[in-house]
Each structure stands twice: as structure tokens, then as C-alpha cells.
Amino acid sequence: MSAPVDAIPSVGAPVKAGAQRKRDADRLALILLLTPFLLWIVLLIVLPHLGIGYLSLREKVGPRVYEFSFANYLEFLNEPIYWNTLLRTAWMSILVTALTLLIGFPIAYYIAKIAGRRSRAALFLLCLVPLWVSDLVRAFGWIMLLRETGIFSAVLQWSGLAAGPVEMLYNDVTVIVGLIYTVVLFMVVPIVSTLDGMDNSLIEAGYNLGGGRLTVLRRIVIPYAMPGIVAGCIIVFMLTAGSYLTPILLGGKNSMWFTEQIYNQFITRYNWEGGSTFGILLLVFTSLVVWLGLRLSGQNLANTVAKR
Amino acid sequence: MTSDSANDLECERVTKRFGSFTAVDDVSFEIPSGSFFSILGPSGCGKTTLMRMIAGFEEPAAGDIRIRGRSVIGVPANQRNVKMVFQHLALFPMMNVGENIAYGLRCAGVAKGEIERRVGAVLERVGLPGVERKGIDQLSGGQKQRIAIARCMVLEPDVLLLDEPLGALDLKLRERMKIELKLLQHQFDTTFVYITHDQSEALVMSDRVAVMNRGRFEQIGSPQELYNHPSTAFVAGFVGDSNRWRGRVAGRDAGRLQVETEGGARLLCAPGQEGLAEGAEVEVFVRPEALALVRADGPVDPSANRLEGRVDSLLFNGAASRVLVRGAGDKLVEVAYAPSGETGELAPGDAVVLACAAADSRCFEAQPHSDGADPQ
């Protein structure tokens, strides 16, 4: 009669082995999924920043002789043109972010709440179409329109509104317009996705309980869309502050964009230490602005990302 | 206006079309002050459209809607004193309970201290004092329900609309909330208009019920009237359970109709409507509790209709238990039975006789394709 008794552990064993195998498979899947992500983070984000941070903290004291020092950071502080450029870049980026929000929110609201089911997909696709074309080509498109011999200038002269050729390139307004055009999509998408999750009856309840259009927008729609708005603003601000092509091409020599300073340090002056310092400063400063923005709007990063 | 002011809400020949589809078709009714009125109908019958017109989210194509005797056609939704409890309640998730309830008062420009007092008072009335600071997701389903009602009632509306608010709750809670809603309505003494597809909700809570089908009101009456004296085949089939037989009128006899069913049985019926001539296609409705079940050799009232069959199965469900009897034409008939009673020891296969009085067998003109609750 010993056989049935022996059978008991042998029944349990395969079950355990199966569970073990499943756990191993889960772990393997996790490792396989995480590997590309970790490689990306470590090789392309963490290592370069460690390198840049290291470079920024050494000073050239002689040919091929370097010392640890904060000289690069001191130089930044002592040269008003540098920190002025950084402040100007931040200020212009904030302006672009605010204007993009003003333009992007109604678009997003229309796509998510007013457009019909079928036109919604078409509108969304239309928003994506400009991304088919490279940044460079799109910037040249603006140049074609706005330069002295460009289309706008020609139309103005032809209609008699302007006496001579009009130069519309190389000023701040053009830079801002060009930047808004490049980044507006990154504002629209997150707001559409939060508003999509909003039950229309919330809006109707807002009206039903006596609210006017403005009240409903201010007290119901915008608070609901806040995570999307914050996400869009962060993306747009970071993209704008870090953009290079659009300010250079549309703003020319006067653009005074901080990325231009970084480029100059690295490429023109071959001053890698100075360039690295500026890179770190841009990262720290923009992060600071984002942190401040989050504090002021009473949001936190986790709920911005995790909401729906 | 003076004589009409006894009614909180009146609809007169209200019609709404979407393209070529008529969602609400020439509907008229009036609701006296302080009553609980339900609109009962299957999904897609137009009841939600009707409610949205009353709330002001849709404009009727024709007809008039009057609240407290004053027409509200052309009055925007936020200026009508009609508040609505939405199907999924639509509590604002970014506000806490107190802010949710205060929203309407703030829109109306009530002073701060007054708002606080009234929010506290209404929470007291719905039995949830002191929850102002709680978040919406900290509330249970039943509590959310009460907050949604409080959010409307704090504005002292003329009419409160409720759009199937119990649909999302589980069964036990739904049963409790039915009673609670009725009590709340008594307490606030406000006209409630309740929309539902669930007949038991409508029957339990309402003073009057309108049964709606395909954009029209089939019948308006008290729950008892609808149940005991349905005026159309749709109402007979939709309100409560019924057994149905299709058949043909074979003769008349002192106000009763002799109907020959498709299965070959002969039933003596009370006509549910006028003008059923000999030879007309009819449907006969008999409620499960109107059928008396006796064993094949038992005594049967000779004046009653008599159907023979065999027990097919027993469906035990406490007080709502049923016996399925396979009768003539292989048709299954539902019969109510008390499991503890004399027929308690029935077994499948037993030969039985079903009897029902002619007055309880109601016949209506057969619909081309009836779409009641009981597909056959």
C-alpha cells in the first residue's frame, strides 16, 4: 500500500516545477524587454552625461594638461552674454510653450470632443502629416515664404501694401512662429488623449448644474485635462529649449539661442570643456523650470504620466 | 398658467427626429407636483432622448415642454431649473464631495458662508454628514449615488431627472437603493422623473409609469394598472412575466373571445383591446401566477381554461420559483409555484393540468414581430 502514499509528493512536484518554469519564463521576458531599454538609457543617456559632466569640471592648464576646477562654470557666470542667452532661451521657450498651449488646446478639444468619430481619425492624421518631412526642409519652407524675395513679400508688393521688398526672416516673431509650428503636435497629442478619456456627461453635468461655457471650461474641462496639459507643456518646453535648427535658420545671427552657444563651443572653438559646461547648465536650468512649473500648477510628474 | 401650475412638468406633442429616424414621436404627458414618475422602455425606445430634451441638451423638432407652466423651448440647459442625475453619475473627479455639491451654488453666485451651510444641510439630509472633504473615489457606489442626488437637490430644482442611475450597481445594492430613492423623493418632496429599462425599478418606486416603445408612449398608469390592465400587447409583454400563445379568434361568447392557439389548444380570453373580429391573429398573455397547477387527476374549475402537459423542469428561486410545463404544440409554459406547498413534490415528467380564468387570459392583436422582453 505504499504506492499511493508515494504518489502524493509526485503529484505536487510537477505543479511546483510548472510554477517554477512559469516564473523563469516571466523573468526571462522581463529581462528581454528591459535589455534594449537599459542599453539605450546607459549607453546614450547616462554615459554621455557622465562624460559631459566630467569634461565640464576640468580646466586646460597647458597642452594636454588638465586640472579639476570650476573654471568653466565661473566663466559662464562672468560673461553676461552666456547667461543672458540662457535666460533668453528659457524665456522664449516659456513663451512658445504658452502660445502653443493656447493654439493646441482648442485643436485638441475639437478633435477629442466636437469632431465626429470618422473625422477625428482624419484630423489626427493631418496633424501627423508635417512629421513626414524633415525639420530642415520645413524650415526652408518658412524661408521660401518669408525671405525678402519670398512669396509673402511678393504678394505684399503686388497688392500695393508694401513699397519695397519686405524681410520677414531673422526676427524673434519668426523664430517663435516657426517653433510653435514644429512643436504644436506634441501639445495636441497628450491633451487629446486625456480629453478622450473624459465622459461627455461631465460637461453636460457642468451645464445642467447651471454653469456657463466659461465656467465649464475653467472648472471642469481644464482641470480634467491638466495632466495632459502639463505633459504637453513639459515636452514642448524641453523640445523648444533644446532645438537648434529652427532658431538658427529662421533667426539667423540674431537668434541668440543657447544651443547655438553649445555648438560654437564644441565645433567652432573646439572648446569641449566649455561646450560640456553649457550642456549641463542647459539641462539643469530647463529641469529647474519644469520643476517650478509643476510646483506652480500643483501637479506632480507621476500623476501626469500615470493618468490614463 | 394658473390652472397648470399643479403640474411640475408637461410635455405636449413632443417630437424629435434624427435624420429620417423618429426617436420621440408625438409624446404628451403631464406630471403632478411631488410625484415619482417613471419612463419605462427597452433600450433605443427614445426615453433618453426625451429626457435630454427636458434637460435642454436637445431641442424638440415639434411640440412644447413646460416646467411649472412655463415653456422652456429655447431656454439653454444651464438656465432650466431641471437637474439631472446621469447614468454614470458624472461626479467631477477632480473635486471633493463638498466642491461637487457647491459647484452649482457657486455658478448661481451664492455667498460663501451660505454655500457651506447649504452643502452641510443637504449632506445631512441624504444621510452622509461631514463627508465634504472626502474624494469621490473614496466613496462606495451607494454613497456616490446619494452625493449625485445631493448635488442636484441642493439647487432646489422643480424637477429631478434620473437616467438609469442604478444600472452600474450590483444587485443587492440596487434593491436597497430603490427603497432609498423612494424615501429621498418623499423627503425632498420634489418631482422625480426616472428613466429605466428595468421594470421592477419602475414598478417598485413610481407613482405613475409611462411605458415607451419606438418613440411613443404605449400606456401611462399606476404600476398596478400597467400590471393588471395592460392596454397594449407591448405593455402586457414588457411589464412583468407572461406566457404567450399566438392564435386566431375562433368565436365570440358574451364578451369573451374563443381563441384557437397555434398548438391547437382552445382558450377563452378577455379582449385587451377593441375590434378583435373573428379570424383575427391574436396573442394571448397569461401571467405565471394566474395559472393554477393541479395533478392530472385533480379537480379543475370547469369554467376555467384547461391546458394539459407534463412537468419539464423545476426552477427553484425562493418565492419566485417556477415550474416549466411542456404543453400542447411542444410549448413551454411558466407556472408560479410555492415550493413548500402541496405541489412541492412535483418531479419532471409528471402529468399535470393548468387552469386559468378567462379574465386572466388577455388577448391582443398580434404584432408582426413583437419585440418584448420574452423572445420566443
Image (spheres, coloured by chain):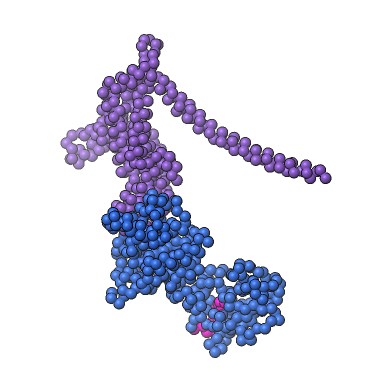
Chain colours: A purple, B blue
Residue situated furthest top in the rendering: A63
The percent position of residue B218, horizontal first and vertical second, equals 45, 74
Label tally: 0
Pick the residue in front: A3 or A121: A3
Viewed as shown, does residue A46 lie left or right of B280? left
Image spot of residue B10 (x, y percent): 35, 72
Task: Report whether A101 appears left or right of B305.
Answer: left
Q: Residue at x 37, y 45 (%)?
A: A226
Q: Nearer the viewer, residue A214 or A44?
A: A214
Q: Which residues are magenta?
A: B275-286
**Residue in the image at 23% along x and 39% along y:** A155
Q: Based on the displayed image, in which of its 4 quarters is residue A148 positioned?
A: top left
Query: Looking at the figure, which quarter contains the N terminus of chain A?
Result: top right
Q: Looking at the rendering, which quadrant does residue A75 occupy?
A: top left
Describe residue B325's horizontal placement relative to residue B275 as left or right: right
- Answer left or right for B72 relative to A51: left
Answer yes or no: is residue B267 visible. Answer: no
A279 w.r.t. B369: above or below: above
Q: In this view of the protein, which residue sits in the foreground, B154 or B38?
A: B154
